[in-house]
Amino acid sequence: MAIELLIPVPDEVLSLRTISEPQTLGNKLKIHSEKAGIPSFKNARIAIVGVQETRSIGQPHQRKQNLNGIRKALYSLYVGNWNNNIIDLGDIPTGDKEKDSHRALHDIAKEMYQRNILLIAFGGSQENTLGLCSVFNEFEVYYNLTSIDYKFDFGGDGSLISPDSYMSKLIANRPNYMTNFCNLGYQSYMVAQDEIDLMERLYFESIRLGTLTSDLKVVEPLMRDSDIVSMDMTAVKSNELQGGLTQVNGFTAQQFCALARYVGISDRVRFVGLCNIPESSTSSNLTAQAVWYIIEGMHYRVNEYPFSTKENSVRYVVSCDDQELIFYQSSLSKRWWLEVRPEHDSNLETVLISCSEEDFYTAEKGTVPERWWKAIRRSII
């Protein structure tokens, strides 16, 4: 089993606990060490694991990423007012082939999925997403994927669909259980128009960097509907990080951590991947703090997934553009949902998608919310 192949956290990292404050994460986590072995999964709610694979990051000569700096930074952070039991599983070793590393991540993620434990994987590339998504494929469960990235990752070498692109592999997979893909933070000048057109044809969702940085709250409904979130560190602008192929424009460190908190708050998110991490002290600190904010966010989950319309909610019916739209607002969290009824096939179930209060007011003014329209179109294709 992949669990048994995990590499324990090295002593050089563990030794820092002796000089750290008792209330820091390093002294509160249950850690996979050479001496103690793999910690018990009993009562665990969150598991973190490192991914050493680097071949898809353009470092074939290196193959192994040193993740000690991230753990040192993470272990030095103080715990919040949390009631979550957290375990550190150590690192997934690099396989003989890159696909072996992805398979090992799949096996770890599958174990966490079955135990209802949120998995946070850091290190490696966006290719890790394949290992996470394959868990839902194996169980034949439909899922939504959200990527925080400056580009869509469809094409390469001048081709719209590239066999080397993780997103191309996902949309070409059959059977395909990915219901929706959402990109947060793309930069128009870094994305080919063909890719933007493809996103539109597939009725996927995306929000440009400029729109997000003006109001990060717009991500909340999208995160609420996400099962897997991939956070690419290249989405952070270069003057916030040291080293690596980062961008002149991008999210600030503060914004990236705010996004991480929204990831943690989502009742639905099962897997989170932080990838393409430059090896520098600054990027290690930012990665550690992003992990901290994911954990912090999980503490504030309302546990409204799946959302029930039969209790603790108010129903609103809005006539809009010859459509009858049905909204629900939670009496507990005050968050909003929108009913989607596939009209072309009565055998398909009515589903609820997350939305914002602004979507409700937009519908009242006679404009169909874009989320509803795209969800209807996806149900047809």
Image: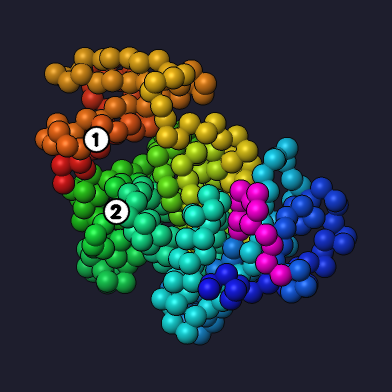
Q: To which residue does mark 1 refer?
A: 349
Q: Is residue 62 magenta?
A: no
Q: To which residue does mark 2 refer?
A: 177
Q: Position of residue 52 (x, y in %)?
A: 56, 73
Q: Secondary structure at mark 1?
A: loop
- Residue at 54% x, 60% y is 121
- Residue at 52% x, 33% y is 303
Q: Is residue 35 above or below residue 236?
A: below
Give neighbour class at mark 1: few <14, some 14-19, many 20+ (Cα, 10 Å): few
Q: Which residues are magenta?
A: 37-48
Give neighbour class at mark 2: few <14, some 14-19, many 20+ (Cα, 10 Å): many
Q: Is residue 273 left or right of residue 221?
A: right
380 or 40, nearer to the observer? 40
Question: Which numbered circle lies on residue 75?
Answer: none
Q: Position of residue 93 (x, y in %)?
A: 56, 76
Q: Is residue 299 left or right of residue 347?
A: right
Q: How is the image coloured?
A: rainbow
Q: Position of residue 19 (x, y in %)?
A: 88, 60
| Residue 293, image quadrant | top right
Q: Is residue 35 above or below residue 268?
A: below
Q: Is residue 42 magenta?
A: yes
Kind of residue sitting beneath label 2: Tyr
Q: Nearer the viewer, mark 1 or mark 2?
A: 1
280 or 163, nearer to the observer? 163
